[in-house]
Image (tube, helix red, strand yellow):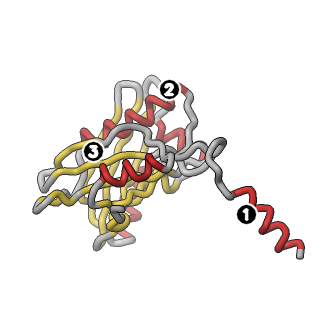
């Protein structure tokens, strides 16, 4: 089993990107390491800024509505401003994907490959963790031999955005696993917790 190296970054959906950038750079002491505007498709898109302090990276995203509502604006309207996904850095993304898929994990698209000027970058999104929840996971691989990517790549971010937009257009609401068919202990845990509380 390939282990996660750590958390690569956390991504926040926000209403006002300029104000959030000010919060992180002028008050919280982060530096901007990457940014891109109008990332997405002709139907909808987003603007994004990535800030970093030490090893902590946070991606900030604001939606742009066009022919349809941006998935970022939809997230904010549904769940409020906050964390959309958590990216885990792994040393072998293909091995982790195979391992997770054997256990029924579902991804919203294929592995995306890019290069940021420092090294190759590979990324892949899961579907949301729970029913009615907007939070999902990302797998990120930055280390490739002696090369290591440090920032992000517009093409891969755009492709990831388009995977979510495709399901958004179809009205699909999937989760990271099929909660209806997998033998999960959640119901038993709830019953046990209720029994303990009643006792």
Q: Nearer the viewer, residue 108 or 183?
A: 183
**The residue tagged with tag 3: helix, strand or loop?**
strand
Disc 3 vs disc 1: which is toward the camera?
A: 1
Query: Which residue is tagged 2?
Result: 169
Q: Is residue 73 toward the left or the right of residue 123 in the image? A: right
How many marks do you count on the picture? 3
Disc 1/disc 2 C-alpha distance (Å): 36 Å
Write the residue at 55% across / 46% down: 177
Local packing at callout 1 (Cα closer than 10 Å; few below 14, some 14-19, many 20+) is few
Residue underneath mark 1: 189
Quarter holding the N terminus is bottom left
Q: Mark 3 highlights which residue?
A: 36
Quarter of the rendering containing residue 30: bottom left
Q: Earlier in the sequence, mark 2 or mark 3?
A: 3
Q: Position of residue 4 (x, y in %)?
A: 36, 64
Element on which disc 1 rests = helix
Residue mark closest to the camera, 2 vs 3 = 2
Q: Residue at x 44, y 42 (%)?
A: 107
Residue 124 location (% of width, % of height)? 35, 46
Few, some or many residues within 10 Å of mark 2 (<14, 14–19, 20+): few
């Amino acid at each position: 089993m390939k282990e996660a190296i750590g958390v690569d970054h956390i991504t926040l959906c926000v209403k006002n990107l300029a104000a959030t950038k000010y919060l992180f750079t002028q008050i919280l002491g982060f530096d901007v390491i990457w940014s891109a505007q109008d990332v997405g498709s002709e139907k909808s898109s987003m603007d994004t800024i990535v800030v970093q302090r030490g090893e902590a990276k946070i991606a900030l995203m604001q939606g742009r509505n066009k022919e349809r509502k941006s998935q970022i604006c939809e997230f904010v309207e549904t769940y409020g401003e906050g964390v959309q996904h958590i990216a885990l850095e792994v040393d072998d993304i293909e091995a982790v994907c195979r391992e997770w898929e054997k256990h029924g994990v579902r991804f919203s698209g294929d592995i995306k490959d890019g290069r940021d000027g420092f090294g190759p970058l590979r990324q892949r999104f899961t579907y949301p963790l729970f029913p009615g929840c907007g939070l999902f996971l990302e797998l990120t691989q930055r280390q490739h031999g002696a090369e290591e990517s440090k920032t992000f790549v517009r093409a891969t971010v755009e492709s990831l955005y388009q995977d979510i937009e495709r399901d958004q257009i179809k009205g699909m609401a999937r989760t990271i696993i099929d909660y209806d068919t997998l033998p999960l202990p959640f119901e038993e845990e709830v019953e046990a917790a209720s029994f303990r509380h009643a006792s």
